[in-house]
């Protein structure tokens, strides 16, 4: 082999030895053995070689190629597990981003903070529930359509994934004598085809206040105080008559908020005065105690507040989305 080619071989083998990691190895392969690599370049030089030397030059090139390929295969077979000794651990990293609370967690924290200032104590309840807490004690009759197997995740052993955080009302009232003022946030589950506004898991914030002389005026002023603290001092609350088995009377809650400069009524959940049947079920005398309850959809609030167009984005953990907040 000509000394010229020998120099190339030495340089290539040295570079191979120093290449770090699978990426480094691949970069070496491309540089030396690739279709536009240095070996190809040397082969092109053959036209400048005197005719009588061409055969020898060609053979030398072939042996160089064989040597490089063999060295490459050998190196590859050894694998790359240990970090290369050439890694410079003092080099600045490429700008690590700090983790942060998820947009749902932040919305819940902010909501609990507002209700906390109004005297509501945060509590939690299990996501795996039974039908008594999810339906029966909440005055939902056996034949009620909300119990349909197609609308709930039943485990088949009497347990289910809760479909609403109203379960926590029963969890608390079963063991706590009034006055009670709690707020409960958490996940709920309903079979649903996923689209921009539906997901089979979402979050609710549930509030419950039971005391002497609690009236619907207290309910409305609590929701209004929340709306103004959370959405701004111009926010409004509207209650539209509705029906829920566990409240009487019942209403849908709308809040008026400014979205992209325009005022809009947005439906955020349900509310009402705790049905006497519910109080009786947990051993509280409805003649002495009254209460109100409400349940608000967290995703709806977060989507409106932060201009999020698709509920699925919140659970896909795409970094480009997460980084926005
Ligand atoms: N649990 C109801 C739902 O998921 C929302 C709700 C309505 C909660 C009225 C309440 C209430 O506490 O009083 O649709």
Image: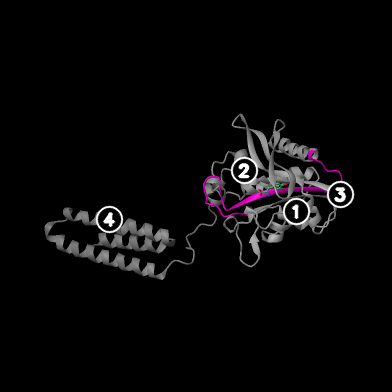
Residue ID for mark 1:
169
Question: Quick check: 270 above or below 285?
Answer: above
Asked if marks 2 and 1 touch (Cβ < 8 Å), the reply is no
Q: Residue furthest left?
A: 52
Question: Which of the marked residues, 4 or 2, is nearer the chain's N terminus?
Answer: 4
Task: Please tell me whether residue 193 belongs to the stretch shown in magenta.
Answer: yes
What residue is at 58 percent from the left and 38 percent from the top?
Answer: 307
Q: Position of residue 182 (x, y in %)?
A: 78, 50
Question: Which of the marked residues, 3 or 1, is nearer the chain's N terminus?
Answer: 1
Frontmost of labels 4 and 2 is 2
Which residues make up the magenta segment? 188-216
Closest to the observer, 275 or 164:
275
Q: Is residue 125 left or right of residue 18?
A: right
Q: CA distance from mark 1 to mark 4?
A: 71 Å
Q: Which mark is residue 300?
A: 2
| One can see residue 283 in this view | yes
Question: Which of the marked residues, 2 or 3, is nearer the chain's N terminus?
Answer: 3
Label 1 residue SS: helix
Frontmost of labels 2 and 3 is 3
Badge 4 density bin: few <14, some 14–19, many ≥20, Cα 10 Å: few
Label 2 residue SS: helix
Frontmost of labels 1 and 4 is 1
Q: Is residue 61 left or right of residue 95?
A: left
Q: Which mark is residue 287?
A: 3
Label 3 residue SS: loop
Frontmost of labels 3 and 1 is 3
Residue ID for mark 4:
35
Instruction: State whether label 2 is within 8 Å of ligand 1.
Output: no
Q: CA distance from mark 3 to mark 1?
A: 19 Å
């Amino acid at each position: 082999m000509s000394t010229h080619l020998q120099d190339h071989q030495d340089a290539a083998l040295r570079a191979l030895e120093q290449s770090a990691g699978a990426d480094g190895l691949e970069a070496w392969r491309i540089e030396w053995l690739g279709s536009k690599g240095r070996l190809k370049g040397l082969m092109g030089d053959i036209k400048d070689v005197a005719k009588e030397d061409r055969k020898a030059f060609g053979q030398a090139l072939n042996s160089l190629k064989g040597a490089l390929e063999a060295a490459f295969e050998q190196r590859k077979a050894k694998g790359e597990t240990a970090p290369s000794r050439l890694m410079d651990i003092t080099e600045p990293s490429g700008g690590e981003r700090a983790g942060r609370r998820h947009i749902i967690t932040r919305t819940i924290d902010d909501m609990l903070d507002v209700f906390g200032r109004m005297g509501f104590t945060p509590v939690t309840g299990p996501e795996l529930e039974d039908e008594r807490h999810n339906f029966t004690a909440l005055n939902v009759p056996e034949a009620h359509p909300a119990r349909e197997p197609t609308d709930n995740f039943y485990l088949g052993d009497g347990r289910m994934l809760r479909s609403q955080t109203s379960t926590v009302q029963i969890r608390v009232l079963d063991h706590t004598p009034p006055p009670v003022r709690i707020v409960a946030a958490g996940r709920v589950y309903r079979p649903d085809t996923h689209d921009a506004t539906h997901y089979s898991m979402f979050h609710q914030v549930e509030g419950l206040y039971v005391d002497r002389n609690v009236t619907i005026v207290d309910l409305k002023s609590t929701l209004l105080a929340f709306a103004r603290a959370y959405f701004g001092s111009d926010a409004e609350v509207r209650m539209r008559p509705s029906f829920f088995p566990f409240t009487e009377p019942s209403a849908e809650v709308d809040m008026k908020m400014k979205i992209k400069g325009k005022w809009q009524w947005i439906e955020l959940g349900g509310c009402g005065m705790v049905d006497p049947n519910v109080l009786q079920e947990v051993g509280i005398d409805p003649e002495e105690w009254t209460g109100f309850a409400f349940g608000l959809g967290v995703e709806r609030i977060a989507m409106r507040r932060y201009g999020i167009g698709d509920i699925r984005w919140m659970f896909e953990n795409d970094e480009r989305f997460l980084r926005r907040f």
